[in-house]
Amino acid sequence: MISIITPVYNGDRFIESCIKVVIDQACPDVEHIIVDGGSTDRTLEIIQQYAEKYPHIRWISEKDSGQLSSIKGRLNKIFAQNLLNNSK
């Protein structure tokens, strides 16, 4: 499984093209994790529209302290989840 993590904050001008680029890769074993930092523009609306159509898109929206914080926080959750799944 390939995980693509995209941090975004108020990125309604570019998030759709980012999502489309990942979709166009046509990779069968990919997940696209979009981590929104609490956007106040149309970013979430756009993400939700695509997430409803494409099951490989997962997203979370929560206030953070920037892109690095966003990526680190999500990676920690992913690694913890994978450790729990693999320990069964």
Image (cartoon, rainbow, N blue to C red):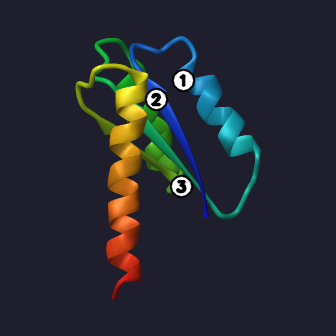
Name the residue located 41 percent from the left edge and 80 percent from the top edge.
86
Asked if residue 16 can be seen in this view, the reply is yes
Quickly name the residue at label 3.
56
Residue 82 x, y percent position in the rendering: 40, 68
**Mark 3 residue element:** loop
Kind of residue at badge 1: Ile
Residue with the mark numbered 2: 7
Alpha-carbon distance for marks 2 and 3?
Answer: 16 Å
Residue drawn at x 62%, y 28% is 18
Q: Residue furthest left?
A: 63
**Residue identified by numbered label 1:** 15
Q: Residue at x 54, y 51 (%)?
A: 54
Q: Residues within 10 Å of mark 1 (few under 14, many from 20)?
A: many
Find out whether the residues at labels 2 and 1 contact each other: C-beta distance under 8 Å: no
Quadrant of the snapshot with the C terminus: bottom left
Q: What is the x, y in percent for residue 19?
A: 60, 34
